Image (spheres, grey):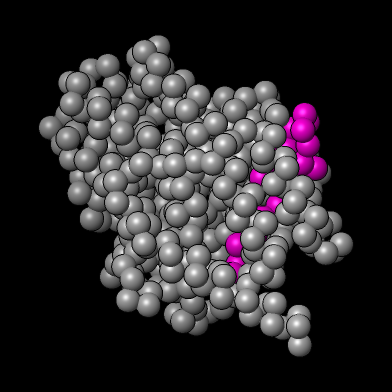
Amino acid sequence: MAHRRTRRLAALSLAASLMAGAAAAHEGHDCTSAPGGAAPAHAAAKAFLDSLGPIQGMTAVRTHSKQAATRWSNLPLALAPRVGVRLGDLNEAQTKTANALLKTALSSCGIQLLDDIRAADAALKPLDRDAIGWDAANYFVAFIGEPSADKPWSLKVDGHHIALNITFNAPHVSATPLFDGVEPVEFKLSDRAYEPLAPQAGAMRAVATALVGTPAAKLDGEFRDVTRGSTPDGDTDFPITYPQGAKGRGVAYRALPPAQQALVRAAMGRWVELPNDAIAKPLMEDYTSPSALAQTYVGVAGAADLSKPGSYVRIDGPRVWIEFIVQPAVADETKVHYHTIWRDKLADYGGAFAR
């Protein structure tokens, strides 16, 4: 009886977290962070592991290896099994320690985005006629490597339409690969309105609209998904290859007027602001340094207002790689949904598995 009561309390905690996601409704973009860095993350990871049962604890920790690190997908659970501990199986105390852990790795914007994407899966669950696993409970936490004060390890949060890979004590500060997407794009739960990727979509829409009159920005071909994403079997193409030189990469950032350059930097920031400031600040400084921006390109395809499938925007720098794509929705093919990915050409998985 006590066990069932604890699970019910955890479910209520999960529901409260989901419903709170729309409270701020992305008003502004002032992301806040708790003190970040490897030491707080290590302490919070240890507290979370200590809250788990023996079997859960063994499930949560994976060997620090390329094979384990690259095992993630944006697909629903039935199409791509996950590793780690399922958030929907945590009791109230475990949910509390999981939330404390996330606050050491993510900004308030990152936490809200995770909550809102899970809320989108709650909205899809009644439509899951094929049992593919749309469910706010089907999100997993895993550690790639035993959390340590000085050795490399990663926090992995993985589920439908989100994959967080945040690495500590590695050669490079890292929050990538970071996949985020959403279906439905807009929805209501308990009379609250959600639009999880509004900041990202709005920023990319502003870039694409500004570049309508810039032929050099147009990318050749058609786009159906992000080009540097994952598969049901994981990030199987890692290490990733990227375009070289200037051809086929869009318009050079340095060729844009200052107002358009500002839009590109703002769009970049909508992804880089998702991890904790201890991670986000040094990455954004690197991505927006004069030398990096001098080698950055912006490409667009499809509808500038991002209203149609195939609409696509990409920011491609010497390190940063961000893609945004509009696809047909799965639950309702008359609508659209979004896929995005942020990668770091140098620091994916902390650079621990470089060539």
The residue that appears at 66% across and 45% down in the rendered structure is 155
Task: Describe residue 21's horizontal placement relative to residue 266 as left or right.
Answer: right
- In front: 4, or 318? 4
Q: Does the segment drawn in magenta span residue 150? A: yes
Report if residue 195 is visible in the image. Answer: yes
Q: Where residue 182 appears, x then y in whole percent?
A: 41, 59
Within the magenta stretch, is there residue 158?
no
x, y percentage for residue 86?
67, 64
Looking at the rendered structure, the number of numbered marks drawn on it comes to: 0
What range of the chain is rendered magenta? Answer: 137-155
Residue at the left extreme? 213
Choose top left, top right, bottom left or bottom right for residue 304. Answer: top left
On the image, the x and y values in percent for residue 243 come to 45, 26
Please tell me which residue lies in front, 221 or 301. 301
In the figure, 13 relative to 211: above or below?
below
Residue drawn at (46%, 81%), measured in percent from left and top?
A: 126
The quarter of the picture where residue 270 lies is top left
Name the residue at the right extreme: 54
Q: Would residue 302 be seen by someone viewing this image from the given angle? A: no
Q: Quadrant of the N terminus?
A: bottom right
Q: The C terminus appears in which quarter of the rendering?
A: top right
Q: Residue at x 46, y 20 (%)?
A: 286
- The residue closer to the viewer here, 284 or 179, is 284
Image side of residue 334 versus residue 354, left or right: left
Residue in the picture at 24% in, 44% down? 205
Viewer-nearest residue: 25 or 298: 25
